[in-house]
């Protein structure tokens, strides 16, 4: 019985050793380790070993981002927040038509985002022309269809029944995408980046953002080749 | 250093929850470096770490209202970063992580130090990179960031017993890879 209790105590202390070394235990646990290690050579040796490991891990440095990287990261995030707000805002609550909305974007300082903002605005214009006046290629039947797929990364979305193609184009544009194809008979659109190809995480984030819009049922990422 | 009440992480989070973009930017800039470093340790790739920072802080912006103050703000934010980084790392093959780690991490100490110490750092870095992300996070949160056992359980959203078990397996694997000879050690607050 006493032997079993001793083994149990040993196991408990063994598990706590890393946080004894790092100072992350409460008073009672610390006392438990100290009381046990005095009579346990294995735990005393493990304590030394973990202290050495802790020293090595603590000494491993990683590159730190500089101020310019931090500024760029903030600009990207701020733009993402604006995009999400634009996508999530109910259409009626925003008032006016798309032209008014675009004018509002200009007045509201979208130009401060520079070239990407101009690209997005141009994408809106092109996408709307395409949907309203131009041909609407219908070669994407499912979210995973590969035939005729674009060369680079893309998003595929399934729009809610009766969703206005112009509204889909607008949603795509505020997320930094342009309608490349669709809608198919099933309401599937393919969207391609309006500017530089985003990374996987950015694609996933854009898909999630679009999916939050009531006009979009599903959004999936098709990574580039 | 004590911050004025309106500049604490808790106050900035509360302001963020009210949609205060200025407060959120201040919080972002305060956590950009720490979250980037944590993500880089877990993913091994600066480009992924950059994305993790963006996704983490976007989640903070969206969910600030749900922060109830039961954990410290830093614990809450690191918890989000852990989940985002684990997902990002899951998208990458482990082998490519090893290659990138050796290329991009600086040596532990500057060039005039003994070769042996540099070798130790490389060996430890390589050994850490073989750990599953939940074990790697446990080791880093314990030995680099100095989080308490209970805080690591909060960050990684699991019971304290699971944290201990993850560390137990990490220790066994690191010992198998590195042996016991890692140079002189020091108990911080024993």
Image (spheres, rainbow, N blue to C red):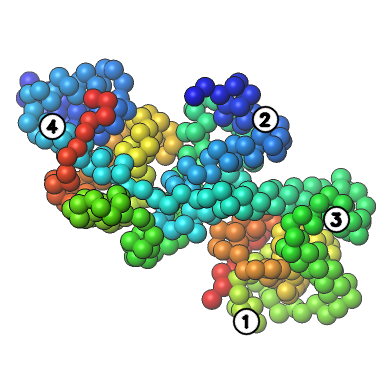
Residue B76 in the image: above or below residue A157: above
Q: Residues within 10 Å of mark 3 (few under 14, many from 20)?
A: some
First along the sequence among labels 4 and 1: 4
Kindly identify which numbered label has been placed on residue A106. 3
Mark 1 or mark 2, whichever is nearer to me: 2
Q: Secondary structure at mark 4?
A: helix
Callouts 1 and 2 in the same chain: no
Q: Residue furthest front?
A: B112
Locate the C terminus of chain B and report the quarter of the image it occupies.
top left
The answer to whether any part of residue A162 appears in the image is no
- Helix, strand, or loop for circle 1? loop
One can see residue A225 in this view: yes
| Residue linked to disc 2 | B15
Q: Would you name the residue on which mark 1 appears?
A: A147
In the image, what residue occupies the spot 56% across and 29% down?
Answer: B9
Residues under labels 1 and 2: Cα distance? 49 Å
Numbered marks: total: 4
- Which residue has dot 4 on it? A43
* Depth order, front residue of B16/B1: B1
Q: Report whether mark 4 lies on the same chain as mark 1.
A: yes
């Amino acid at each position: 019985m006493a032997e079993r209790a001793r083994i149990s105590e040993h196991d408990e202390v063994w598990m706590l050793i890393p946080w004894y070394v790092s100072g992350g235990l409460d008073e009672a646990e610390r006392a438990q380790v100290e009381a046990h290690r005095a009579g346990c050579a294995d735990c005393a040796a493990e304590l030394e070993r973990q202290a050495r490991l802790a020293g090595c891990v603590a000494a491993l440095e990683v590159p730190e981002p500089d101020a310019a990287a931090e500024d760029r990261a903030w600009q990207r995030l701020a733009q993402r927040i604006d995009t999400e707000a634009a996508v999530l805002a109910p259409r009626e609550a925003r008032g006016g038509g798309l032209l008014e909305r675009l004018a509002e974007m200009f007045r509201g300082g979208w130009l401060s985002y520079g070239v990407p903002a101009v690209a997005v605005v141009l994408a809106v214009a092109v996408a709307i022309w395409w949907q309203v006046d131009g041909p609407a290629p219908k070669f994407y039947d499912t979210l995973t269809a590969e035939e005729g797929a674009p060369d680079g990364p893309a998003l595929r979305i399934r729009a809610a029944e009766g969703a206005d193609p112009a509204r889909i184009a607008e949603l795509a544009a505020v997320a930094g995408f342009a309608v490349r194809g669709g809608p198919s008979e099933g309401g599937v659109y393919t969207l391609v980046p309006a500017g530089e190809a985003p990374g996987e995480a950015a694609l996933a984030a854009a898909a999630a953002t679009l999916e939050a819009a009531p006009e979009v049922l599903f959004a999936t990422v098709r990574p580039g080749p | 250093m004590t911050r004025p009440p309106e500049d604490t992480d808790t106050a900035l989070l509360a302001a963020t929850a009210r949609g205060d973009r200025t407060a959120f930017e201040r919080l972002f800039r305060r956590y950009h470096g720490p979250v980037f470093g944590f993500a880089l340790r877990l993913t091994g790739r600066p480009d992924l770490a950059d994305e993790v920072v963006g996704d983490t802080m976007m989640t903070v912006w969206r969910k600030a209202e749900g922060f109830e103050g039961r954990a410290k703000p830093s614990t809450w934010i690191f918890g989000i970063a852990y989940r985002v980084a684990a997902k990002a790392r899951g998208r990458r093959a482990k082998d490519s992580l090893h290659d990138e780690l050796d290329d991009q991490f600086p040596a532990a100490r500057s060039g005039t130090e003994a070769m042996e110490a540099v070798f130790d750092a490389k060996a430890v870095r390589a050994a850490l990179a073989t750990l599953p992300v939940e074990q790697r996070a446990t080791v880093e949160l314990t030995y680099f960031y100095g989080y308490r056992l209970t805080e690591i359980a909060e960050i990684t959203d699991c019971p304290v017993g699971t944290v201990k078990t993850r560390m137990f397996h990490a220790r066994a694997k690191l010992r198998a890879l590195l042996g016991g000879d890692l140079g002189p050690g020091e108990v911080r607050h024993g």
